[in-house]
Amino acid sequence: MKRLPLFTALTFAGLTSTAHAADLMSAWQAAQTRDPEIAAARALHEQATFRQEQAKALWAPMVSANGAVGVGGADSRIKGAEVPGMMSDMTFKTNVNVGALTRASIGAQKAWISPEREAQSKQLELSAQIAQTQWQQAQQTLIMRTAQRYLDVVAAEQTLTILQRQQKAVQQAAAEISKRQAVGDASVMDVQEANARVSEIRAHVLTQENNLATKQVAYRQLTGQEPTQLAGIAKVDSALVNLADAHTWVQRAKQQSPTLQMMGLQQAIQAQEAKRIKAGNAMTLDWVAQAQMDRLAGNGAYSSNASNQMTQYMVGLQLNAPLSTGGMVESREREALKQVEKLRYDQEAAELQMEQQVRDAWQSLSTAPARLQALSQSEQASKARLSATRQAHRTGARTTNEWLGAEHDAAQAELAVLQLRTQTLMDQLRLYAASGDLGEAQLRQLNARLK
């Protein structure tokens, strides 16, 4: 008796999960938490924060401390020294053959003028911008992949439904023709033709069942949800967005496309690399502060208890000016500049390809209403022809082959409308993605067009 409430709860949970999976938005939200590709992109995006910190740290003071303890020796001689008011031309000698040596030093250095650090800092900042753009592109890619797999399942289900309806009609026709042949109202050839069509449509149905199973697996892997009771594709004839002209979409894509933005950032990073290489032979100026103390005590030639202590310190500027690198820096700089030129041409080629993609998607969308209207009219005409052919076959005015051909043509017309509706919905997302405008708002628009 105690198992009944548990069974009821599990059943309710399963129904809730099914209802949750029927929404495109919930499928996308589930994919965000499950898809490993978006998780990897999120990790890269989070790395951008550390790169920005590294760019700032390049200009922060560098502080170091050193200490040493060991056994050492020293020998020094000063000649020509003078003690004021006493003696002149004196000689001082110190010596420690073996003694205890201690050394301590501390220093701080902060770059003030450093072209190389400037280039490195800019590279890190540009790299952080690339990570941000990659994250935007990854989100758009996930939206496209989720919508594609969702619509793949929906289209496969509706295609299977159409084929099963055709299969049922063909089977009924075959049964009717067999009965008529038994009473002499149909020929053996009619029966053979009907049986051939039954076998043919059965093969199509089995193939489509396999295709649907494959699409369902892909959907389940992405979202972790069962693809049951998904909202179907509604009529999109009057639901198309009000498209701007193709030139506007092309310009928007060139300005906002994540792909083109990343290529521009990569070109800028390579340009900074050329500057960094050139800066390897440039003058640098640093703020420095240093202090050091050495102490040595032990037995020497002049005393059994000799000691020597030296303390040094300084605060000021340190200038470094390389004189020659033998041509290595200049050669590497020219090589880096050629890479910048190559990336610029790559970006131009990508812009041409992006323009073609945008214009293809725009052209497809701009003619979609007319094509959908034409295919819908063709579908209606095919259904009317099928009805008339059925009636004419009963009176003997049409052959069995014509009847079954009309069944096939009606199903194909319905499938053509379904395919164009699916393609139109995806073309809208592709156009938004190419222009860099694809986001949750556009996905909600698509979700609203599902019934």
Image (cartoon, rainbow, N blue to C red):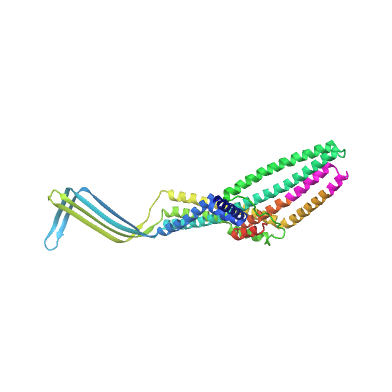
Is residue 143 in view?
no
Q: Nearer the viewer, residue 161 or 147?
A: 161
Residue 411 drawn in magenta: yes
Residue furthest out toward the top: 188
Is residue 125 in view?
yes
The residue under the point 55% across, 50% down is 3
The residue under the point 80% across, 37% down is 192
326 left or right of 31 in image: left
For residue 317, above or below residue 393: below
Q: Nearer the viewer, residue 93 or 394?
A: 394
For residue 238, above or below residue 388: below
Q: Nearer the viewer, residue 331 or 168?
A: 168
Q: What number of labels is visible?
A: 0
Q: Position of residue 59 (x, y in %)?
A: 40, 59
Q: Position of residue 76 (x, y in %)?
A: 18, 51
Q: Nearer the viewer, residue 339 or 267?
A: 267
Q: Position of residue 448 (x, y in %)?
A: 65, 59
Q: Position of residue 451 (x, y in %)?
A: 68, 57
334 left or right of 366 in image: left
Q: Quadrant of residue 256?
A: bottom right
Residue furthest out toward the bottom: 85
Residue furthest out toward the left: 86
Q: Main secondary structure of the magenta part?
A: helix
The span picked out in magenta is 388-415
Residue 302 drawn in magenta: no
126 left or right of 305 in image: right
